[in-house]
Image (cartoon, helix red, strand yellow):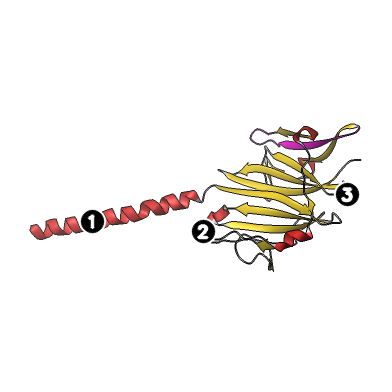
Amino acid sequence: MRVGSGMRMHWLVVAALLGSFAIPRVAEACSCCDSVTTSRPVGWSQAGGALVIETTSNAACSNHHVLEVWVVGTSEAAGCYDLLDDPERRIPCGLTDHPLDAQLRTSSQTTRFPRAATALPDSEVRVRNTVARAGGRGEATVDVMTAHGWARVWSTAHERLDENRQVNRDFALPVGVSVWPNPRGDRALLLITSIVGSGHHVVAMRWVEMPH
């Protein structure tokens, strides 16, 4: 009888230990469900044909902090510099992952982009979101103020939307938009921020022509 009681006690202890291990694993997995990605334009090349952007992200539970080099008009970054590893070595762009206590470094690459990036004031940018009901199609538009009044520079009318989401899932309506003109004033980068899925704060990028 005492043997049976001892065996039951043994399995109760094992079950308790397994349960104690399972709890933090579930919590850790859930902490990866949401993420925040930020992008901050830093500077333009002297001629205004390229822009360097500082991007951070904890997507997929990563520790990601890089400089991205964007050539005006392109849909992908031309190269990246990892500020948590070797900040002078150019690497292909993609999600990096480092320990949470990794040291943030500075990169001399920013000297190649000496012209400070500045966004248009909020008062000169008008963003309108029309979020569709289920089965419908939403739309977002962006206008900028010119000497002749408001002029449209971008809308989702030419984007392939699945209801309120862009098909490659890099943004979803409603969106927030900031406008970053190049030094020549003829082109600008739109930083499009939104929340995708259960809580992924993402940033999409689009190049637009600026009205005269």
Residue type at tag 1? Val
Classify 10 Å Cα crowding around label 2: few (below 14), some (14-19), many (20 and above): few
Describe the element under mark 2 as helix, strand or loop: loop
Q: Nearer the viewer, mark 3 or mark 1?
A: 3
Q: In this rendering, is residue 158 above or below 7? A: above
Find the distance from the CA under tag 2 to the CA under tag 1.
36 Å
Find the distance from the CA under tag 3 to the CA under tag 2.
40 Å
Q: Which residue is mark 1?
A: 13
Residue type at tag 2? Asp
Describe the element under mark 3 as helix, strand or loop: loop
Q: Which residue is mark 3?
A: 184
Residue 134: x and y in percent read 63, 35
Q: In this rendering, is residue 23 above or below 151? A: below
Q: Nearer the viewer, residue 127 or 184?
A: 184
Residue at 88 percent across and 49 percent down: it is 184
Residue at 59 percent across and 59 percent down: it is 104
* Total number of numbered discs in the rendering: 3
Q: Which residues are magenta?
A: 131-147
- Relative placement, left or right, of 115 versus 99 is right
Please check the rendered image and state whether residue 70 is part of the magenta-colored stretch, yes or no: no
Q: In this rendering, is residue 190 above or below 48? A: above
Q: Which residue is mark 2?
A: 101
Q: Nearer the viewer, residue 183 or 153?
A: 183
Task: Tell me the quarter of the picture where residue 73 sits.
Answer: bottom right
Residue 160: tell me if it is visible. no
